[in-house]
Image (cartoon, helix red, strand yellow):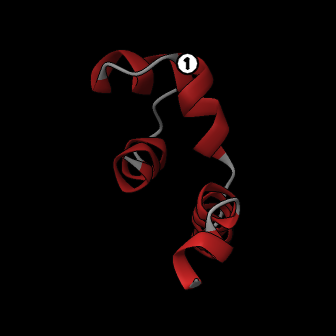
Amino acid sequence: MYTEIHQLKELGLSKTQVANRLGFNVNTVSKYWNVSPEGMVDMRNRVKQTKYSAYEETILG
């Protein structure tokens, strides 16, 4: 998803055009529009840590 959005952005398409072409909501496209590849890695890591952090002690126990 991230890569597709940025490829179409580089072609000069607007957020709305990208959203329509990919079948995403414009808000989803906006979320990733200005995110760097490094920022995307940080976003994914934060989600993973948050998702499992509530169960960490149970899993390790």
Which residue is located at x 63 percent, y 57 percent? 47
Is residue 58 found left or right of 20 in the rendered image? Answer: right
Q: At which x and y percent is residue 11?
A: 40, 44
Give the class, few, some or many, for how many residues have Cα within 10 Å of label 1's Cα (few <14, many ≥20). some
Is 30 located above or below residue 25 in the figure? below
Q: Nearer the viewer, residue 49 or 16?
A: 49
Q: Tell me how many marks there are.
A: 1
The residue furthest front is 61
Is 46 located above or below residue 28 in the figure? below
Q: Quadrant of the C terminus?
A: bottom right
Q: Nearer the viewer, residue 21 or 14?
A: 21
Secondary structure under the numbered disc 1 in the rendered image: helix
Q: At which x and y percent is residue 57?
A: 67, 75
Type of the residue with mark 1: Val
Q: Quadrant of residue 52?
A: bottom right
Q: At which x and y percent is residue 1?
A: 37, 46
Look at mark 1 in the image and give the residue it sits on: 26
The residue furthest bottom is 60
Which residue is located at x 62 percent, y 21 percent? 27
Q: Nearer the viewer, residue 2 or 43?
A: 43
Is 52 located above or below residue 24 in the figure? below
Which residue is located at x 46 percent, y 51 percent? 6
Q: At which x and y percent is residue 33?
A: 62, 43
Which residue is located at x 37 percent, y 51 percent? 7
Is residue 41 found left or right of 9 in the rendered image? Answer: right
Is 20 located above or below residue 11 in the figure? above
Q: Quadrant of residue 28?
A: top right
